Amino acid sequence: MFDYTFQWKQVLARLPQMLDGAVVTMEVAVLSMILGVAFAVMLTVLRLSGSKPLVAIATTWVEVARNTPALFQIYMAHFGVASFGIHFSPFTSLLIGITFNNAGYLAENFRGALKAIPETQTRAGRSLGMTQLQAFRLIIVPQMFRISFLPMSNQMVWAILMTSLGVTVGMNADLYGVTQDLNALTFRTFELFAVAGVIFYVITKIITLSARLIAARLFRY
């Protein structure tokens, strides 16, 4: 028989702690995206370099990131490298794992975007006196980011959701970790995780809608 008594006031009283955790969640997600984009551009360049060793390194990164669970990548960053005497804090391990994942997916998005850009764009830049590198940096890369913008926003949403995996390596400062700790203190499981779910939903919706508005404004032509 259903006799559960909801205690929303007890949970809402702890909302400030959960919002502090949401800030940490955003910090991890944003940092992982910034680093992920930087590494993804590097991987994209390596895959275009024509050097077999560099192409192999970049391809291996992308294949591992895209074909293994994100939890495995975070575990390797925290527990795996610890076997060799390298120890990271839970925050750093979570950041490394999500960054590794982001870079792999974004590199593949960038590769697809580059295929959508006609080779004539590079030739046009060269005809204006640009070097190959200048044409790539000033003409190709901006178009690559434009084509990849919405997929990048989707990856940002995925990065936010992946932060919840940090609890498996002892991360308790983010939204999921704070919720887990509060649950251990209050045993208000349904109420706490319902509120946490709403916060996650609101954050991801804000990002998705903001990305669409930015895309509509900047990429009208």
Image (spheres, rainbow, N blue to C red):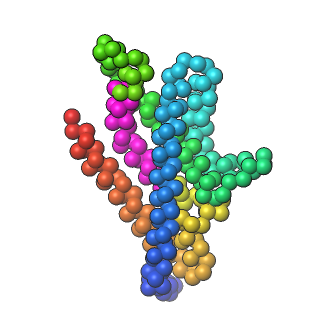
Quarter of the picture containing the C terminus is: top left
Q: Is residue 138 left or right of residue 103?
A: left
Name the spot of residue 121 as percent of width and height, x first. 32, 20
Residue visible at 78% across and 49% down? 85
- Compared with residue 153, is residue 204 higher up or lower down, i.e. above or below? below
Q: What is the magenta segment's predominant secondary structure?
A: helix
The magenta stretch spans residue 120: no
Is residue 105 visible to us here?
Answer: no
Q: Residue at x 53, y 80 (%)?
A: 188
Residue toward you, 29 or 11 = 29
Image coordinates for residue 133, horizontal then vertical, percent? 43, 21
Q: What stretch is highlighted in magenta?
A: 139-161
> For this view, does 52 lie left or right of residue 200?
right
Q: Which of 103 and 35 is in front in this view?
A: 35
Find residue 12 and report its image quarter: bottom left
78 left or right of 63 in image: right
- Please tell me whether residue 66 is drawn above or below residue 32 in the rendered image: above
Which residue is nearer to you in this view: 99 or 12?
99
Give residue 160's position: percent from left, percent from top.
47, 55
Relative vertical location of residue 77 with respect to residue 113 in this rendering, above or below: below
**At 35% across and 52% down in the image, what residue appears?**
208
Please tell me in which quadrant of the rendered image residue 173 appears.
bottom right
- Would you say residue 159 sits in the magenta stretch? yes
Which residue shows up at 61% across the image and 63% down it?
A: 171
In x, y percent, where is residue 143? Answer: 34, 31
